[in-house]
Image (cartoon, grey):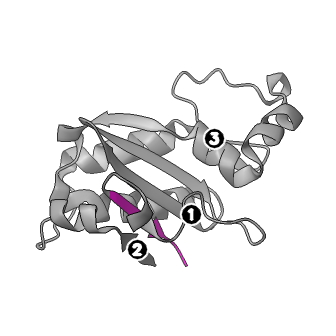
């Protein structure tokens, strides 16, 4: 496991990292429970009505470029800032990544927390051998605070 944060996120995260609270742990469990495999991709499906046969994968891949892009695009969750306390960001990302991995056969995952305006943008995807991560490894190139947790 490794993580990468940009300078903007360093200013947000408290140096004294804490374990996930009961509320935060419940949130990550709910996210995993509302995720399923679609074409070997972990896809967040809160409504539970996503059907693989209704998806134009060729069209989507023309737009997003690869399966990592598809997965990260499907798995964009917007959470209120108060959903996760800053000192729990890393523990939350690690907990979500490990729970996704355990649920989906040990696959390696990447989890991103981005602070965008007054929300936490959460994204996750499978790490694929022949595809890059969703974001560039130089997170300082982005304008918002970002944490990227990578399972190895």
In the depicted view, which residue is nearer to us: 55 or 95?
55
CA neighbours of label 1 inside 10 A, class few (<14), some (14 to 19), many (20+)? many
Inter-mark Cα distance, 3 to 1 = 14 Å
Labels 2 and 1: the sequence-earlier one = 2
Look at the numbered disc 3 and give the secondary structure of its residue.
Answer: strand
Quarter-wise, where is residue 36 in the image?
Answer: top right
Report the residue that reaches farthest toward the right: 58
Residue interval drawn in magenta? 146-152
Q: Estimate the x, y position of residue 35 in percent, counting from the top left.
A: 56, 40
Q: Mark 1 points at which residue?
A: 109
Residue drawn at 44 percent across, 41 percent down: 31
Q: Mark 2 points at which residue?
A: 3
In the depicted view, which residue is nearer to us: 80 or 29?
80
* Main secondary structure found in the magenta portion: strand
Relative vertical location of residue 110 with respect to residue 63 in this rendering, above or below: below
Q: Estimate the x, y position of residue 110 in percent, counting from the top left.
A: 53, 62
Relative vertical location of residue 143 with respect to residue 7 in this rendering, above or below: above
Q: Do the residues labelled 3 and 1 touch (CB within 8 Å)?
A: no
Residue drawn at 80 percent across, 27 percent down: 55
CA neighbours of label 3 inside 10 A, class few (<14), some (14 to 19), many (20+)? some
Q: Estimate the x, y position of residue 7 in percent, counting from the top left.
A: 27, 68
Residue drawn at 11 percent across, 72 percent down: 16
Q: Which of marks 3 and 1 is in front?
A: 1
The circle drawn on residue 36 is 3
């Amino acid at each position: 496991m490794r993580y990468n944060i940009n300078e903007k996120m360093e200013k947000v995260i408290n140096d004294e990292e804490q374990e996930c609270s009961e509320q935060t742990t419940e949130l990550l469990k709910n996210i995993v429970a509302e995720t399923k495999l679609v074409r070997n991709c972990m896809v967040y499906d809160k409504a539970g009505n996503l059907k693989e046969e209704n998806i134009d994968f060729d069209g989507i891949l023309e737009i997003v470029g690869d399966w990592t892009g598809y997965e990260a695009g499907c798995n964009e969750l917007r959470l209120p800032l108060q959903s996760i306390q800053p000192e729990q960001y890393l523990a939350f990302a690690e907990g979500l990544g490990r729970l996704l991995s355990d649920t989906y056969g040990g696959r390696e995952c990447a989890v991103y927390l981005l602070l965008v305006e007054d929300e936490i943008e959460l994204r996750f995807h499978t790490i694929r051998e022949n595809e890059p991560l969703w974001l560039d490894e130089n997170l300082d190139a982005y304008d918002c605070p970002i944490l990227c947790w990578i399972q190895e």
